[in-house]
Amino acid sequence: MGGRGGYAASVTTDPPAFDGDFTARLDTLFAWRRDVRRFRPDPLDEAALRACLAAAHRAPSVGNSRPWRFVRVSDPARRGAVADSFAQCNAAAAARYDDARAAHYRALKLAGLREAPVHLAVFCDEATGTGLGLGRATMPETLAYSVVGAVQCLWLAARARGIGVGWVSILDPETVTAILDVPPHWRLVAYLCLGLPQEEHPDPELERHGWQQEDPRGAELYER
């Protein structure tokens, strides 16, 4: 039987109940979701990786467009070329600082590209017709924001399975796109390293190594 407006009535189920123990453990998961740069060389379980990708696909997306495109980078030559791009961009970034700050910058470990067993490049398909443009006429950037939401879902699913994730942003997107030979309308949003962490820390690496302290404004709720 059709519903109002000609749409078929959907079947509903009772939503799950999340108790206090679950929400406390969820808060712990958020607290321990940290960017990982130091990986063990052990291969990842394929089923666990696929479960993380399935979690990513449950992310919200503007107009239900699901514009994320995940590319596993396994070819050693391509991985090496991405690592070379990082090295070039990292050197250029260090040159922006004065001598003392540049030395501090160079001492930081900002990527695990050489060690991580899995590389995932995450693109936004800017030419997707799925969703028919709904919700992004005035804010087209929400297409890329949807991809970021998928990355966060994957990240939390990975952390829950003991897998570390590192987001490498010190890359030239056009260079990486060319290295991976993907369609030109795919725009790089994230390059992720995944693997079992060498070490575990509840605090951000940049705070732990003295690069910066937390900006308290991020925890504020502004009222208007």
Image (spheres, helix red, strand yellow):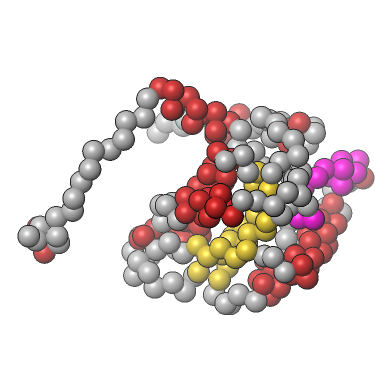
> Magenta stretch: residue 107 in it?
yes
| Viewer-side residue, 49 vs 223 | 49
Instruction: Name above or below for residue 47 compared with residue 163.
Output: below
**Which quarter of the rendered picture does the C terminus lie within?**
top left
Question: Extreme top residue here?
Answer: 20
Q: Residue at x 20, y 46 (%)?
A: 12
Q: How many marks?
A: 0
Is 93 placed left or right of 139 in the picture? right
Q: Residue at x 61, y 29 (%)?
A: 216
Residue 187, position in %: x, y? Answer: 58, 68
**Which quarter of the rendered picture does the N terminus lie within?**
bottom left
Question: Extreme left residue here?
Answer: 1
Mark yes or no: residue 205 visible: yes
Instruction: Name above or below for residue 58 compared with residue 184.
Output: above
Give the residues in magenta.
Answer: 100-114
Residue 123, position in %: x, y? Answer: 56, 64
Q: Residue at x 69, y 52 (%)?
A: 43
Mark yes or no: residue 101 visible: no
Is 173 placed left or right of 133 in the picture? right
Picture quadrant where residue 28 is located:
top right
Is 63 placed left or right of 83 in the picture? left
Residue 71, position in %: x, y? Answer: 60, 65
Residue 134, position in %: x, y? Answer: 33, 64
> Magenta stretch: residue 104 in it?
yes
Picture quadrant where residue 113 is located:
bottom right
Q: Residue at x 18, y 50 (%)?
A: 11
